[in-house]
Image: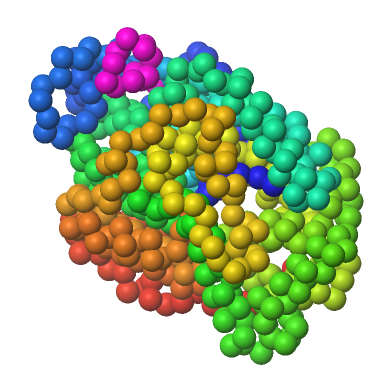
Amino acid sequence: MTVRVAAFVAAALIAGACGGDDSSAPPLITVPDGAAASSTTGEPSSTTEAEPSTVTLPAISIAQVDCPESLVRGDGVALSCGVVTVPIDRLDGADGSTRITIAMLAGYDPGFDTPAAVLQGGPGGASTDLAAWFPQQPFTQVFVDQRGTGFAGPNFDCTEILDALPRLLGSPFDEAGVLAAEAYADCARRLDQDIVLQHTESESHAGDVVDVMRELGYDRWTAYGVSYGSTIGLELLRDEPQGLVGVVLDGVYSPQLDTNAAVVESAGRALDLIDARCRAETICRQYVADGSVRDTLERVMDELDANPMTVSLHGNRTGLPSTIELVLDGRRVAELLFPLMYHESLVRYLPAIIGGLYDRDAASVEWLAHTGARFVIAAMEGNDEGTYFAVQCHDRLPFVDGTAEIDDRFATAVAASPLEEACPDWERDAAPAIANEAVTSDVPTLLLSGTFDPITPPSYAEETATGLANATVVEQDGRGHGIWFGNTCIAGIVQQFVADPLRELDVACAAEPVPVEWARP
C-alpha cells in the first residue's frame, strides 16, 4: 500500500513556522569567533581540493526561534531551535536561498566540547522530531532537518496520501496500492514547480549539515546518522569537509545499494533469522505451527488471501478521525508485521502473534491490526513523502536493476513499488555516477548494526567499512534497526567515539548478545 520509508522513528511532523526569540529557551550554542568563511564569502561548502570557485552564493544565516510545542521534552530539558538560510543550489547562486530547521540539545558535561550533528532517516524524516525524546548526552546534539521537513521552510508532506488513509486501510491491499499511486501522483503534480524540491538530494542535505555546523562556529564536530541519515553521513565522508572529525553510521544505508532489490533481500533474511532463533527455543516453538515462524506466516497469508478478514480500527486507538474497517488479507498482514520487526521489544511478540493469526485468535488479530496500523499511520504522518521521492528518484533510480526475483511471499509483499514505476511522476534528473560509488575516507567512522535489522542488515556495514580506513564495526546480537539507544553498552561506545574518534574503542561489551524473551503481548 505505502512507500516503504526506512525511517528510524515515525514521529508526528512539526507544523507551522516559529518566530521571535524565546526568552525561556537556552540560546543556540555557538562559537562566534570560529564562524565559518562560507557565511561571509559565499563559497561552496565542500572543502575537498578543487579549482577555485567563482560562484557567489547567498549568505548563510541562523535565526533563533521559539521551539514548537511538539518539541517540549518530558524530562524538562529545554531545547533551542533555529531557522537556517542556505543556498538552494551550491553550484548556482541564482536560484537563491531556502530554509531548513534545527534543534539543539545541550550536553550535560562541559568537558565534551565536540558536538554531534544528528541526522534522521527516511528520506523525509525530520531530525528535529528526534530532539523531543532522544536522551541527553554528555555532548551537544544538533538536530539538522532534511529539506522539506521540519517546522519552517518548504513543506514537502504529501497531504494527499494522509487524506486517503481511511480509504487505503479500508481496501484490499492491491486496491489500496492503486489508490496510493493516485494520491502520490496528485502530490507530485502539486509540488512539480518547486525549485527547492528540484535541489533536494543527499548531496544537498550533506551540504546543509556542513553549513549549519560552520555557521554555529564549530571547528571540530562529529555526525550521527541513522538509516537514511547514514547516507547523508556517508556523503559527508565523501566530501570530508573541514571540521568533521568522526561519523557514526547506525543502520547503514549505503549509496551503492540497489533499493528495489535490497528491501526484498533484507526482509526475507530477517524473517529467516527470527524463524531460526524461534526453532531453537522451546517456548517459542510452541507458539507456531510445526515450530516454524515462516511456514506458519505463509499459511496465514494464503488463508487470508483466500478469505480476508475485516477488523474495526477505532479512531481513539489509531489517531484517525473515525472508525475504519481494516481489510486484513495476506499482503496486509505482511505490511503490518514488517515495521514490528524494526525493534527487539516487538520482535519478541511476532511468533505468538503469527501463531494466533493461524488459530484465528481474536486477541491476536486485534493486537496486530491496531498495533501494526498505528505504525503504518505514524510512518505516513511522520515522513514528508515529497522529500522521499525527490531523493530516491534522483539518487537511486538511475542505478536500480529492477526488483529481484525471489520466491519469498513475505519479502515481496513488504517491498515498496519499484522506483521505475513510482518516479516518472516526479521528473527528477539523474544523479551523477559518483552518487552510486562506494565511499572512501580516512575520517574515523563507527558503524553500528543490529542482527535482526530487517532493512539495513549488518552486511551493509561490513561492506561499507571496506572503503573506510579508520572504521570500527559493531554488531549487537538480538537488536533491531538503530541501536544507539536502549542499551548502555552501545551508548557508552558512542560516547567514547565522540570524545575522541581517533582512540581505540573498547567494544567488548557489544559481544554480549541481548536475549530475546519470547512472549505474548
| Quadrant in the picture for residue 472 | bottom left
Query: Would you say 285 lies left or right of 48 here?
Result: right
The residue located at (21%, 36%) in the rendering is 241
Is residue 94 in the magenta section? yes
Residue nearest the observer in this picture, 159 or 115: 159
Query: Would you say 382 lies left or right of 205 here?
Result: right
Q: Is residue 102 above or below residue 318?
A: above
The residue located at (82%, 46%) in the rendering is 171
The residue located at (45%, 41%) in the rendering is 397
Where residue 504 appears, as percent x and y from the top left, is 20, 64
Q: Quadrant of the C terminus?
A: bottom right
Is residue 273 in the magenta section? no
Q: Is residue 65 visible?
A: no
The residue located at (50%, 18%) in the rendering is 194
Q: Which residues are magenta?
A: 81-97
Coloration of the structure image: rainbow
Residue nearest the observer in this picture, 520 or 352: 352
Query: Would you say 407 lies left or right of 455 here?
Result: right
Where residue 181 appears, as percent x and y from the top left, is 67, 37
Q: Is residue 421 visible?
A: yes
Query: Would you say 429 lies left or right of 295 here?
Result: left
Q: Is residue 28 above or below residue 318?
A: above
